[in-house]
Image (cartoon, rainbow, N blue to C red):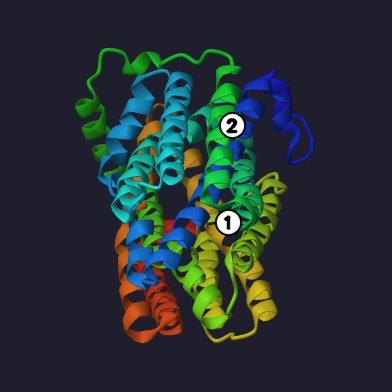
Amino acid sequence: MISNLSRAAGPISILRQRNFGLIWSAISISQMGSQMEMIVVVWYVLNVTDSPFLVGLTAAARMGFNFLALFAGATADLLPRRTLMIIIQAILASLALVMLVLIVSGLIEVWHIFVITMGGGLARIFQMPTAQSLAVDSVPTDRIPNAVALVSAAGNIALIVGPVLGGLMFRISGPEGAYVLVASLYIASGLATFLMGVTRVSETQKGESVFTLVAQGLRYVKGEQLLWSVLLVAVIFNITGFSFHTTLVPIFAKDILDRDSVGLGILISSFGIGGLAGSMFWASIPNLKHTGMFCILAVMGWHSTMILFALSTNFYLSVGILVVTGMMFSSSLVLVLTVLMKTGRPEFRGRLMGLRTLAIYAHAFGSLGAGAVAGALGAPASAVLSGLFGIAMMLVLALIAPKLRRF
């Protein structure tokens, strides 16, 4: 069946393959729950504490255990990925239910939110390499760019629907109602994964320890300029780009644009609409060339639009700018993953995704820094500085990694 898919036309034809369709659905549902949860948590903390720094700390808490990402990737290369994915969704659902009980009982405190958020972040460290590897394993090699783009599109669909749904649920039924739905989504994601065909552990990894696999992965990446340079791209945009929509946009919504949780949801969803458009654009290209140069330009475009957003005080103009920002954002993610999955050897996919996930650890520092600068100088200054720093770092990387420019 997979060989037939390589001849099928259209960017979404691979969704007809049962395992890919199911893992794509599982990823979509789980990410929708994650986006809902992030909006609810951030808005709750902002309203209770009125502290931009604590908002940044909450976002950073999701990344607290990202230093384990490479071990998570090695685990995804060593153990059955389907089983891992099911366990991860069960953990996320359980944490959401614990949060629900604390809220309903009136015992919830800010430190509870930090601890539960960190627990969810730990589970998601294992989810990214596991889910991405499952998706890529389900399609032929020549359809990997399309698969990567469709998985990115799933995340952007979640980014469109999740924040608005989270904002509406927060307004209508408070965080309690939102968490009922969040837990239900994680459970549904686990069920979709359960329906997949059983996956096998790669024969080349049997009998190896996790530490051995980690060491092998690091040596492999160190010897490939294309791999380490594109991973540095991910580090850069996690420091400067991700903190923009997770930490700064909520502050813009409340303090600059004078909007409530629904307005915040609309802003984040406009970002997701642009992201979906960007993902589907790359999914529709059959033979992608000049991937590295497009990646560099996309990241620089992302940071340029952050600066434009910082200069806007009009809600509708800000929405429009965020659509373009989302397009650059999703293009950056798709192109980074395409380089990793196309050039990396199949037996290293979990570890490559683990390193990609490890790059997200930089987001914690970016969120803390963005929140601190926003508290001291204001959100616009923080966004401008993040944008300028990101552009400068990409220019330096483009100079020291010629293979990335030419790929």
Disc 2 is placed on an element classified as: helix
The residues bearing labels 2 and 1 have C-alpha atoms spaced at a distance of 19 Å
Disc 1 is placed on an element classified as: helix
Q: Residue at x 25, y 18 (%)?
A: 208
Which residue lies most toward the front here?
Answer: 105
Check if mark 2's residue and mark 1's residue have beta carbons within 8 Å: no
Report whether 248 appears left or right of 366: right
Residue type highlighted by circle 1: Ser
- The residue closer to the viewer here, 279 or 343, is 279
For disc 2, the marked residue is: 26
- Whole-percent x and y of residue 218? 25, 40
Report whether 355 appears left or right of 294: left
Report whether 237 appears left or right of 157: left
| Res 352 → quadrant | top left
Report whether 327 appears left or right of 307: right
- Whole-percent x and y of residue 125? 37, 40
